[in-house]
């Protein structure tokens, strides 16, 4: 139980949204079902909007006093976003993280929700509709892979390695043009620098022990609050690029996740120098 929200109920809501609104539309979107938001790589689909409507309605049933912050709700009413930091209880939702992948028919997307109590993230869930499983974390209770058959596996980040052996993901699309060349050059220092175009699976992969780092620049709460708590509970060091604690109200300042603090410091000094 997190505040007045049962995390199991919230997990079931994400699954219901996927079954009813997302999976039937996967590789089955019609003309006009995909639209650009801010640019060609920033998309919204009918599935995003329908899934968020269902999740919002179900959250209102189990937690009627909770503030609901959804990606599409904020797109329709930007004034919602600043209310998150001061909310006594809030649920933050990304109905489809990886909309570009979803629209392209790539089976790498997720449904994410986090719970914020008095400005602190207390729980997070990443549901994978394709695998029908959840990664769930509650503050102080670890991060867990939960399967539909009821089995649970505790997650832990990878052991530290040298810079040249590090594998991870870095989002470079929001770097300023003059910064991007230096950033891409620095990324040659690590073994692999990938991008799934999907934070949900990047965070799951990190918490599961397969990555050594993640880096993001744009910090919308529906994209990163859930991943931050899951990775922290799996043992990672998570901080903004200036070393400060990542808070629900932050939308910039970048985020760097590493398997431990020495790895974080090394990556910040040698790779993510902007």
Image (spheres, rainbow, N blue to C red):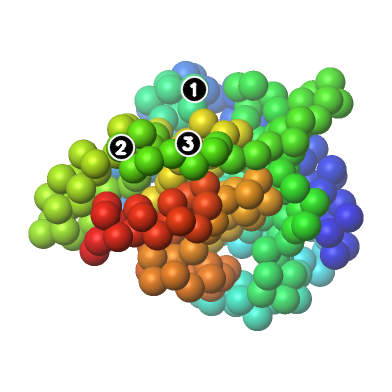
List the residue tagged with mark 1. Answer: 107
> Going by the image, does 232 lie left or right of 269?
right
- Of pointers 1 and 2, the one earlier in the residue sequence: 1
Provide residue 38's location: percent of width, then percent of height.
Answer: 31, 54
Q: Distance from label 1 to label 3 (Cα)?
A: 20 Å
Split into 4 quadrants, where in the image is the C terminus?
Answer: bottom left
Q: Mark 2 points at which residue?
A: 164
- Residue 119: image x %, image y %? 66, 74
Please identify the quarter of the rendering in which residue 120 is found: bottom right
What secondary structure is found at the residue carrying circle 3?
loop
* Picture layout, residue 147 above or below residue 267: above
Mark earlier in primary sequence (3, 2):
2
Q: Which of marks 1 and 3 is in front?
A: 3
Q: Please state if 218 lies on the left or on the right of 155 as rendered.
A: left
User: Is residue 84 among the parts visible in the rendering?
Assistant: yes
Mark 1–mark 2 Cα distance, whole angstroms, equals 30 Å
Instruction: Name the residue located 36 percent from the left edge and 34 percent from the top edge.
Output: 165
For residue 154, side relative to residue 222 (left or right): right
Residue 141 in the image: state x and y as whole percent: 80, 51
Q: Spatial distance from mark 3 to mark 2, Cα to Cα?
A: 13 Å
Give the tally of numbered discs. Answer: 3
Name the residue that disc number 3 marks: 211
């Amino acid at each position: 139980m997190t505040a007045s929200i049962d995390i199991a109920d919230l997990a079931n809501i994400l699954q219901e949204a996927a079954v009813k609104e997302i999976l039937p539309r996967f590789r089955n979107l019609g003309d006009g079902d995909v639209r650009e938001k801010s640019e060609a790589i920033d998309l919204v689909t009918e599935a995003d909007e329908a899934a968020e409507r269902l999740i919002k309605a179900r959250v209102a049933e189990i937690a009627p006093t909770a503030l609901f912050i959804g990606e599409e709700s904020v797109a329709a009413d930007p004034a919602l976003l600043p209310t998150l930091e001061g909310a006594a209880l809030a649920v933050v939702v990304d109905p489809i993280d990886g909309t570009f992948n979803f629209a392209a028919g790539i089976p790498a997307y997720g449904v994410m929700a986090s719970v914020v109590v008095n400005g602190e993230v207390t729980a997070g869930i990443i549901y994978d509709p394709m695998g029908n499983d959840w990664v769930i974390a509650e503050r102080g209770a670890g991060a867990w892979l939960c399967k539909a058959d009821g089995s649970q596996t505790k997650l832990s980040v990878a052991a530290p390695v040298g810079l040249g052996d590090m594998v991870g993901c870095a989002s470079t699309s929001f770097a300023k043009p003059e910064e991007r060349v230096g950033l891409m050059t620095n990324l040659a220092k690590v073994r692999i620098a990938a991008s799934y175009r999907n934070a949900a699976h990047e965070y799951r992969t990190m918490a599961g022990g397969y990555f050594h780092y993640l880096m993001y620049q744009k910090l919308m709460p529906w994209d990163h609050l859930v991943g931050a708590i899951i990775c922290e509970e799996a043992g990672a060091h998570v901080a903004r690029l200036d070393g400060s604690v990542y808070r629900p109200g932050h939308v910039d300042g970048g985020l760097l996740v590493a398997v431990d603090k020495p790895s974080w410091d090394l990556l910040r000094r040698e790779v993510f120098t902007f």
